[in-house]
Amino acid sequence: MEEICGLPTDIAVSVVPYEDTWKVEIMTNGPQDAGRTDMIEAIAGRLRIQFDLKS
């Protein structure tokens, strides 16, 4: 994956319940890249509007 598109393979993103909705938790073996974290959280924010895990 890293060779094809430059994305790290040592990262995991999980969807977890949070209050009345959900959030993502980003786990990595190394230091988190702030830009990549912001991008993932922005994508999750757009998806949160479309998908409600309660239903």
Image (spheres, rainbow, N blue to C red):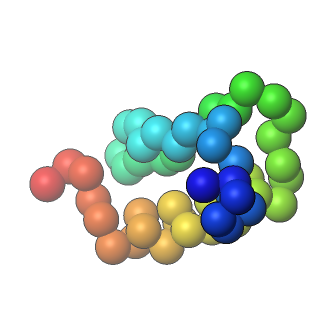
Which residue: 73% across, 26% down?
A: 29
Vertical position of residue 40 compared to residue 49: above or below: above
Q: Position of residue 46 (x, y in %)?
A: 49, 73
Q: Position of residue 51 (x, y in %)?
A: 30, 65
Q: How many marks?
A: 0
Q: Nearer the viewer, residue 9 or 16?
A: 9
Vertical position of residue 51 compared to residue 53: above or below: below
Q: Which residue is most to the top?
A: 29
Image quarter (top left, top right, bottom left or bottom right) of the N terminus: bottom right
Vertical position of residue 14 compared to residue 46: above or below: above
Q: Nearer the viewer, residue 35 or 48?
A: 35
Q: Position of residue 6 (x, y in %)?
A: 73, 62
Q: Is residue 6 visible?
A: yes
Does residue 54 appear to the left or right of 43 in the view shown?
Answer: left
Does residue 37 appear to the left or right of 22 in the view shown?
Answer: right
Quarter location, residue 42: bottom right
Does residue 45 appear to the left or right of 2 in the view shown?
Answer: left
Q: Which residue is most to the front?
A: 3
Quarter location, residue 47: bottom left
Q: Position of residue 15 (x, y in %)?
A: 42, 43
Q: Is residue 18 visible?
A: no
Q: Nearer the viewer, residue 54 or 6?
A: 6
Which residue: 14% across, 54% down?
A: 55
Which residue: 33% across, 73% down?
A: 50
Which residue: 85% across, 34% down?
A: 31
